[in-house]
Amino acid sequence: MRYVGGAFRYVKQTYGKRLKLIEGDWDDIQNAANEEIDGDEVVRSFPKMCAFSNQVMGQPTEGWMEELLAVFSVLVERVGNPAHLVEECDLLSLAMVARSDDIKFERFKPVMLAALRSLLPQTWSTAHEEAWEWLWATISRNLTESTMKVKAFKPFNKKLFSILSEEHHETFRTTIYTKFFAKCAASQDLFKQSQTRLRYIADRVLSCAHDMMQRAWPESSVWFQGVVKVLWLIPGKFPGYGVPIDLFGPFTDTCVEVVKPIVAELPYNVTSTKEMLCPADRAHYLQENELQSHMMIEGFRWSIGLVARILMRTITEGSTAVMQAIHANDSKRLKKALRDAPRAQRVNWQLRVRVGSQSISPLYWALRSGCHGAARTIVQDILTIRADRDRYYYGADELFRLQPDVVENLLREAPSLAKDFLDGLIWRSHKTQDGLRPVIYYLEHLLQDQDESQMLSRSMKSFISFKDPRTITHPILVFSLDLIWEKLVMRHFLQDRLWTLITFIVYILAQSVLNQKVYLDDHTLHNYMGIARMMVYLVGLGQLLFWLLPLAVPAVLAVCSNGLKGYLAQWEQQVSLALTVNLFGMLLDMIALKCEAYTPEMEIVYEILSVCGVFLFSLLVLDLATVSIKMSEYKVLCSRALGQALKPQIQKTYDLSLSSRFLLPKEPPDPKARAPDPEVFLCLGAVAACIVVFSFSIAAMVQEVEHVGLEDFADIGGTAQVLIQVAWGLTDMEELKVVAEKSTLMFMALCRPPFSRRAEVQAIILYSVLVYTCFYNLLVAQPA
């Protein structure tokens, strides 16, 4: 007893002191790293300091060292638990072997000590150096053994799974459960699924044993983290089902027993009985003709054993009271589990369950598993303000820090919880002041993202992309969007659209005003027209290219993967692209007109492109209606009505008399009648804008106007007068017949519905559809 007691005392005094020194030093380093500011010249984080030490020593930071630095914090935390440290070293060895072939652990020791001395200049001493040297000696010993095994097992593991046939897989599926049930009768109560499900589990066992060894990507650590997360999520329901971890050992042994006869059947042409060292541990000898079967079986045992150890630790460390309540989807049980949580740790209990170097979010798991009742309780509990004397606890910051995509997950898995989430970001006082209740909106994470490279927070983007009117009209979202619009967006938006409006005016002068014969006779005005067109091509086309060229590479990738529609999702982008192509076509056509290759058809094409340019510019300028909510609503209604009107399968009915009676009552108005609705003025304004746009578009068709030969279309004023008559139903039908006979293009722009039933059905009468179907009938449909 004296010797045993002395041994315990020695271990406690020696290694306990070292562990305390290491823990204290690492806490200081982590706290300093959390205070590090981007762009700061002083390096405070351990990985950056190690990279700097490598540069000073003249050696590069190799791939295996990057993998080591990525999980070094976990190794430091696990050094007091040898079993967990070995498991972490086994996982790390897989990533290190995938990144580097030549691994020399002795290179890391001076780098580590130099970095620690630089980060802890005031507290560093001989005792600290001895403690960290002992730490690295322990870690390097485990890593050396693990990397030796991985390098030895990996080629044999690859060969094993490359020659396994479907017959071998079927043997594994049918034999594993028979032997396992015979060995552990209690396991039959846990495998009550269908045969299809059991066969799938058997296939997943082989897949995990293969992927754990062979998946070697350039960024292997990312893949290994994903694999480990998936493995930890697989037993996520095990605590709820009460699966004992004692069954993992027999199940692993059964898998190896089933694989042994399969490996024995595989061909191997080596017959030599020469003894050689085992490449996995270099500690014992085996015959050369037994090398393949031994390495395949031991490699499979090591790989599947590592998976089993991960699952066992996940069940042990992840079986918290909160997780068990989530699996049961019991809100009362969840609240009871949170009673024992300290206020400072209450949020972490619901957002992070740490298992090794990875963590599971109970909230995310509740959303993914369909336990929405428990998820609602978690959201409400996290976003509840709690006080402890002079200190207040509110979990919004921790929620967005630990789970930055919480809004996206919430809207995808449980949209009904969006209201509870948004209500939790609002604090309302229970007292009133002057008949008003004080309210505080927590807007930080709706406006600013954790990733500073994001222009807009991911949370707000998710709410906008969700496209739910009830959600987007929540008070805090309305306030946030109004704040963004008024303080940030509106000024830049108006500058951009006003510049487009100026370009549109110059375009109208060049294509619809100065191209008239009255002005072409004046040489000075003719030069002005050339200058105006040059400004359109240089300024207008240059602005469009400035918008679209930065998106050229993403556009090509998006078009190749999802098609053009998937990339040009916004109508502004579609119109901008169409206008760019249109202006390029006009420029090329104008160059051809100046060359000897001139043909009359080219001039017709140029006029058609000019008309299209008027309409496309008008659509871009129409976006100025966004500054007014009322105008935006009317624009949306008109666009939807126009979309329905242009559907050829829907027969339209134009009640012109009703529209005329509504707009021009024959009886004198009642003095007691209410004032006209704003919709009347919006309708009249839309009709006036439509008349102006179509007047300029017809003025751009010089050849067509000359071919028709009517005096009413000789200038822009006469054209506008004709359009006003069409709008009020006062058009001379004989003039429209002349237009229809001599110019189909102008007829399509002018004709009203009663003149041509075939044109009405095919929805080609643009102006009439806009005025009658979209504006007048929409006005009549407005509620009183």
Image: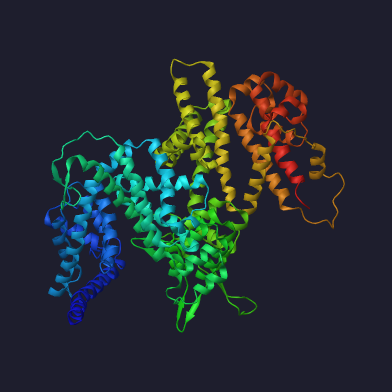
Relative to 458, does residue 321 appear above or below in the rendering?
below
Q: Identify the residue shown where x is 48% and y is 37%.
A: 562
Residue 515: x and y in percent read: 55, 28
Relative to 106, does residue 437 appear above or below in the rendering?
below
Residue at the farthest front position: 182
The residue closer to the viewer here, 30 or 661, is 30
Q: Identify the residue shown where x is 48% and y is 68%.
A: 322
Whether residue 470 appears in this view of the structure is yes
Residue 582: x and y in percent read: 50, 30
Residue at the farthest bottom position: 389
Residue 271: x and y in percent read: 18, 35
Number of numbered discs visible in the structure rendering: 0
The residue closer to the viewer here, 535 or 310, is 310
Q: In which quarter of the image is the N terminus?
A: bottom left
Q: Identify the residue shown where x is 77% and y is 51%.
A: 783
Horizontally, residue 579 falls left or right of residue 696, namely left
Whether residue 352 appears in this view of the structure is no
Horizontally, residue 358 falls left or right of residue 50, namely right
Residue 686: x and y in percent read: 67, 43
The quarter holding residue 38 reads: bottom left
The quarter holding residue 665 reads: top right
Rendering colour mode: rainbow
Relative to 613, does residue 449 appear above or below in the rendering?
below
